[in-house]
Image (tube, helix red, strand yellow):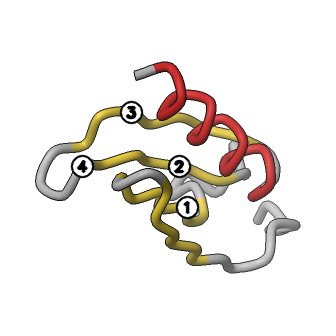
């Protein structure tokens, strides 16, 4: 079995009217975290990162580009 080296995280925050949500990647073999950006009902962006801080940064960069 693969050792899970990523702590269990659920992070949610609002930024410029959008919601950033970060949680552990469901694929335990790849690890890392998945982030999503939504405007309430629609998911606008998602991606995989290795740290929560990277997820927040990438999500904010996306929002700033809108």
User: Mark 2 sits on what residue?
Assistant: 35
Expressed as whole percent of the image width and height from the top left, the position of residue 27 reads 55, 51
Dot 1 and dot 2 residues touching (CB under 8 Å): yes
Q: Which residue is mark 1?
A: 22
State if disc 4 and disc 1 touch (CB < 8 Å).
no
At 60% from the left and 40% from the top, the residue drawn is 60
Q: Residue at x 39, y 33 (%)?
A: 45
Q: Position of residue 34 (x, y in %)?
A: 55, 50
Mark 1 closeness class: few <14, some 14–19, many ≥20 residues within 10 Å = many
Q: Mark 4, residues whose alpha carbon is within 10 Å: few (<14), some, or many (≥20)? A: few
Q: Which residue is mark 3?
A: 45
Q: Is residue 20 left or right of residue 27?
A: left
Badge 3 element? strand
Give left or right: position of 58 versus 59: right
The alpha-carbon separation of the residues under discs 1 and 3 comes to 12 Å
Identify the residue under disc 4: 39
Residue 13 left/right relative to 19: right
Identify the residue shown where x is 67% and y is 47%.
Answer: 55
Return the disc, 1 or 4, that comes first in the chain's sequence. 1
Local SS, label 1: strand
Q: Nearer the viewer, residue 56 or 30?
A: 56
């Amino acid at each position: 079995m693969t050792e899970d080296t990523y702590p269990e995280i659920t992070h949610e925050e609002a930024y410029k009217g959008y919601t950033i949500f970060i949680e552990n990647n469901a694929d335990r073999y790849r690890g890392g975290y998945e982030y999503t950006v939504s405007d309430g009902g629609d998911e606008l962006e998602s991606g995989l990162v290795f740290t929560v801080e990277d997820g927040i940064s990438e999500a904010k960069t996306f929002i700033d580009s809108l």
